[in-house]
Every structure is written in C-alpha cells, then in structure tokens.
Amino acid sequence: MTPAEILRRQEQALQNCRKCKLCEGRTHVVFGSGNPTAEFVVIGEGPGADEDAQGLPIRSRDSSRSRTFVSGTSC
C-alpha cells in the first residue's frame, strides 16, 4: 500500500471519530493535505470555524499568513 493510500484510509477511518470531546463542537474532521512522502511537515493549531465548515485545512483568513510563510508567496 502506498503512503497516499495509507493516509486516505486513515482519513476515512477518522471521519466519524467520537473518542474524545472534540467531536462535540465540530462539523467535520479536518485531515491534513499535501505530499504523502514529504520530508518536511508543518503541523498547525486545531482547525477554526472556516476549516471546520469546509472540512479542509488552512482555509480561514487568519491562516493565509501560514500559507504565505510556508509557500514563500502571497495567497
């Protein structure tokens, strides 16, 4: 199984997770994104309202600074 397949299965397994109280205030599990074989990984804080609503990481206005820092360009 490739790293991408392993991550995809892990994401699917976590979508309905109810093992802690974090599930009480969320709409979606916001799983990471990017290159599954990356040598460098950035782990940010927990998802905000925008990320939760979309189910996608680093989507809020506040997160644009993080995207700029990581990519080195304006988003």
Image (tube, grey):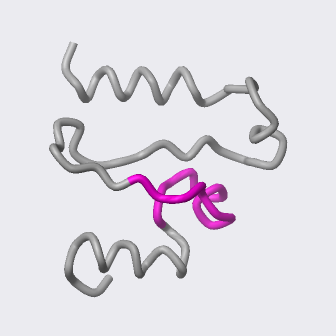
Residue 45 colored in magenta in the image: yes
Q: Position of residue 68 (x, y in %)?
A: 31, 79
Is residue 59 depicted above or below 74 in this figure? above
Q: Quadrant of the C terminus?
A: bottom left
The structure residue drawn at horizontal position 17% and vertical position 36%, both measured from the top left corner, is: 37
Is residue 54 depicted above or below 16 in this figure? below
- Residue 3 or residue 39, whichever sits in front: 39
**Count of marks, rendered view:** 0
Q: Position of residue 27 (x, y in %)?
A: 73, 47
- Residue 38 or residue 16, whichever sits in front: 38
Q: Is residue 4 left or right of residue 54?
A: left
The structure residue drawn at horizontal position 20% and vertical position 79%, both measured from the top left corner, is: 72
Q: Position of residue 35 (x, y in %)?
A: 21, 45
Q: Main secondary structure of the magenta part?
A: loop
Q: Position of residue 16 (x, y in %)?
A: 67, 27
Q: Is residue 48 left or right of residue 42?
A: right
Is residue 65 depicted above or below 55 in this figure? below
Q: Quadrant of residue 38?
A: top left
The structure residue drawn at horizontal position 58% and vertical position 60%, both measured from the top left corner, is: 51
Magenta extent: 43-58
Q: Is residue 13 left or right of residue 18?
A: left
The structure residue drawn at horizontal position 41% and vertical position 21%, both measured from the top left corner, is: 9
Q: Quadrant of residue 6?
A: top left
